[in-house]
Image (spheres, helix red, strand yellow):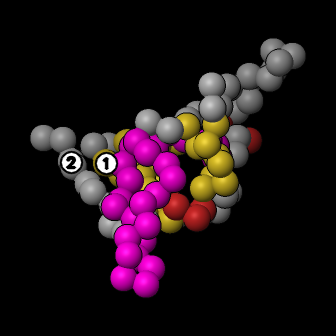
Amino acid sequence: MAARMRPLHDRVIVKRIEEEARTKGGIIIPDTAKEKPQEGCVVAVGPGRVEDGKVIKPDVKAGDRVLFAKYSGSEIKLDGEEHVIMREEDILGVIEA
């Protein structure tokens, strides 16, 4: 059974996008030397934050490719896959194709 999770308030669930395992020069980078990627795909978005009694909708939506702060959010596992749940303010920008 697939786990379903709906983030609350201005929280966002992001699945990290893995980087290439080799450099442009063809050198293979071992897993121990890799840093965690700061790029991901938005999986789910909460309804928004409440300010002065009004709900302010988030600027991101499910499916957006985003860049986020290096040490932001909390790592969680959904259906055996690693995801990061973070506040919308931790997202630095949306990467457009």
Q: What amino acid type is highlighted by mark number 2?
A: Ala
Q: Which residues are magenta?
A: 36-62
Of 90 and 20, the residue lying toward us: 90
Residue shown at 43%/84% (left/top)?
Answer: 52
The numbered disc on residue 3 is: 2
Q: What amino acid type is highlighted by mark number 1?
A: Leu
Other-residue count near label 2 (Cα within 10 Å), few / some / many at <14 / 14–19 / ≥20? few
In the picture, measured across the screen, residue 1 lies left or right of residue 74, that is left
Q: Return the residue at label 1.
A: 78
- Which x, y percent locates residue 67? 64, 46
Quarter residue 23 falls in: top right
The question of residue 58 being in magenta is answered with: yes
- Which x, y percent locates residue 37? 64, 43
In the picture, measured across the screen, residue 50 lies left or right of residue 1, that is right
Other-residue count near label 1 (Cα within 10 Å), few / some / many at <14 / 14–19 / ≥20? few
- Which x, y percent locates residue 57? 42, 60
The question of residue 45 being in magenta is answered with: yes
Residue shown at 51%/53% (left/top)?
Answer: 59
Q: CA distance from mark 2 to mark 1?
A: 6 Å
